[in-house]
Amino acid sequence: MKAYTYIEKGKFALVEKPKPVLIEPTDAIVRVTMSSICSSDLHIKHGSVPRAVPGITVGHEMVGVVEEVGADVTKVKPGDRVTVNVETFCGECFFCKNGYVNNCTDPNGGWALGCRIDGGQTEYVRVPLANQGLNHIPDSVTDEQALFVGDVLATGFWAARISEITENDTVLIIGAGPTGICTLLCVMLKQPKRIIVCEKSEERRRFVQEYYPDVSLITPEECKEFVMNNSDHGGADRVLEVAGADDTLRLAWECARPNAIVTVVALYDKPQTLPLPDMYGKNLTFKTGGVDGCDCEEILHLIEEGKIDTTPLITHRFPLNKIEEAYRIFENKLERVIKVGIV
């Protein structure tokens, strides 16, 4: 089968690999019907993910059909349409039982697919611990509707959940890329008093304005002043930092009111600095990623009920044999791309 593979820093290639087989009784083999490119794939390409293993098939955002299951897999069966969770987790360790599945202590725990073991930008994928890592797609939900459930939408849902948003809050979201928009969709479910989205790209601001006209849109240059003038207590009650640029962490805490929650969703390429003397007295609570992707079943129900729709994010579609072109467009932010579907 064809598999898009991490060769070395700066280089991915579409190569031939054997179809995966069951290794453990908890495994499942899934025929990938649709996958997507994530910014985390680019982090691997650029060498920003030291634990990524050269030679692995990349991709961790996918849906498919179960082909084969191990003897201990009870929650799915061959023929089931499923989402694949970005994280592998056992469900039994201390962290899993407390909902912190990103920190699962299993050897394959956490972000494994497309990083430490073969992922989903291919035709077939082996999913370890499949009872936890696969979720049924309801019959009325299409592959495109479900595509982001296991990763970028799970991230947005998790970020909104841990931010403890109330109906009285002013919420600032920094970044309107794919993760930022998924975060926006999940924040909207909380029905806060006011949502402000800060994004430097004019094209992405235009996208948000077209699909989500009720939110306030601003640029980074005007962000701090706008937030101060449009919040009740000298800053945003909740700030979700989803951009990961050089200056966005500072912007996040500067725009937060005293005693606010700042949720850092972004994956940075470089270390960040917390200038504690400048922050002294703000008494901020920081919550940091990565995602605990344990809400996929709930998210699928919300999609089924029409409360979340991420299909507008799929601006481009390519077959697997054109994935190099898909990456070129996505990596260089060409043609107003938001997300790419690989079919």
Image (cartoon, helix red, strand yellow):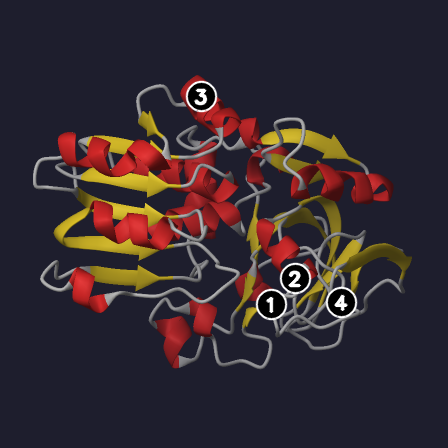
Nearer to us: label 1 or label 3: 1
Res 52 → quadrant: bottom right
Of pointers 1 and 3, the one earlier in the residue sequence: 1
How many C-alpha atoms fall within 10 Å of the one at disc 3: few (<14), some, or many (≥20)?
A: few
Res 25 → quadrant: bottom right
Nearer to us: label 1 or label 4: 1
SS class, disc 1: loop
**Camera sees residue 160:** no
Mark 1 touches mark 4? (CB < 8 Å): no
Q: Amino acid at mark 1?
A: Val
Question: Residue 44 — which label?
Answer: 2
Of pointers 2 and 4, the one earlier in the residue sequence: 2
Mark 1 touches mark 2? (CB < 8 Å): yes
SS class, disc 2: helix
Question: Residue 49 — which label?
Answer: 1
Question: Residue 211 — which label?
Answer: 3
SS class, disc 3: helix
The spot of residue 299 in percent (x, y) is 44, 44
Alpha carbon separation for disc pair 1 and 2 = 5 Å
Side (left or right) of 306 relative to 332: left
Residue sitting at x 55%, y 43%: 148
Of pointers 1 and 4, the one earlier in the residue sequence: 1
Q: Amino acid at mark 4?
A: Ile
Of 104 and 238, nearer the camera is: 238
Of pointers 3 and 4, the one earlier in the residue sequence: 4
Question: Residue 56 — which label?
Answer: 4
